[in-house]
Image: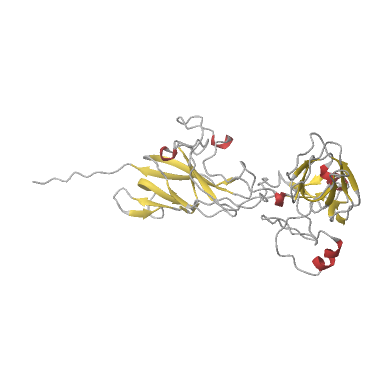
Amino acid sequence: MYVSAVVGGPGYAPRPYGPLPLPTSGAEIPTARGSYIASDGPEPQGYMFDGSPVTTTESMPSATPTTAVPLDQDTNPTGSTTTTATAPTQLQLEGNLGAPVDLWDTDWPSGGYYWTVVPVEADSPGALTASVAVPGSAANVTTLPVAGAYQFAPGDIVLVGTTGNQETETVTASTVTTLTFATTLKFAHAPGEAVIRTGGNLQYRDLELPQDVCAAGRVMRFGKDSEPSLTAAGQLFASGLSSSGKLVSAYSTSKFYGYPLVAWTPALGAYAYEVQWSKTRYPFKPEPDPQNGNALGTMTFATSTVLPLPPGTWYYRVRGFNVSLRTGSQEMSWSDPAKIVVAKPKFKVVGGK
């Protein structure tokens, strides 16, 4: 399920580098309403109507980019020569790639997504009492096991312990069972000791469950279809040597001698491309690339590559990879297979004295 960040207007667009830093106190709300929040989050902790915590998609860590030819159902090696179990890494990416906020194609209208909008209120939580959970905590640590820790939120001020070892801490993160504090605990705390919040920062709570909203009919459907790369427009986007040794394009020849250079149009959202080639158009059975550890194809950042094809009739196809999709599922649509012919060399015997 895709969960957006909280928005204050009637429109939404994903922010791959984090949600907006919404107000954490009631006094900050008028200021936020009268200004333009330009920087990214973090967003205060949100909760569903049933009290369970919400993790927005925009707050997720970056997906792991695909840097080697994947082995999936669409690259079935049946009928091909032996391939390696794991293709070698061909690409390297660095830096913050952003959260995986994009959606997969759905082959619309046969497939699609359903979306709805849930109202959210900013709630200032009242007093809350919990207790230290087993096994307790030592001194000089920043985490504390707490029963029902999900009820706390970053920014909450809590009192931990009893008379003699009570101390004040600021919550920086919470899970179902653990609180994380801004500073280390000065004392050890045993199971059963009190953890008290007298009041806390604003929390953003859904006023309805998404299931109830959809059941009431307040739901819409949409699909997504990415335009695949094009490998031809009348003639192939290809060039290479002719049988007579001239550098030509597919506009002037239907055959190439040696390894041809093929190109394709960029795919919107793609950061890299995979190219495969087969001896048959259908079924398309990708052949191994001896220059890439016998992987079933090759990867590139560019929109062109040289195909290591021996003489014969071949079919090749291209697809993009979108780093804004989830890890392991970043493939985009394949292009239509394109036909290319690699000719054998021609020799001429020249007589002489």
Residue lying at the far left of the rendered structure: 353
Horizontal arrangement in the rendering, residue 186 relative to residue 260 (left or right): right
The one nearer the camera, 46 or 272, is 46
Q: Considering depth in this image, is 232 or 177 the residue closer to the camera?
A: 177
Measured as percent of width and height from the top left, residue 18 is found at 70, 55
As drawn, the residue found furthest toward the front would be 164
**Image coords of residue 190 (percent x, y):** 82, 37
Q: Nearer the viewer, residue 62 or 125?
A: 125
The quarter of the displayed image where residue 119 is located: bottom right
Please tell me which residue is depicted at 50% across the width and 39% down the height of the picture.
281
- How many numbered markers are drawn? 0
User: Residue 167 location in percent, x, y?
Assistant: 83, 48
As rendered, which of 343 and 206 lies closer to the eye? 206
* Residue drawn at the location 80% of the way across and 66% of the way down: 32
Q: Is residue 251 above or below residue 84?
A: below
Question: Which of the image's four quarters has the N terminus?
Answer: top right
Q: Position of residue 61 (x, y in %)?
A: 66, 48
Farthest right residue in view: 127
Instruction: Please say which color scheme the image uses.
Output: secondary structure
Above/below status of 262 relative to 190:
below
Left or right: where does residue 13 sit relative to residue 165?
Answer: left
Q: Is residue 256 left or right of residue 236?
A: left
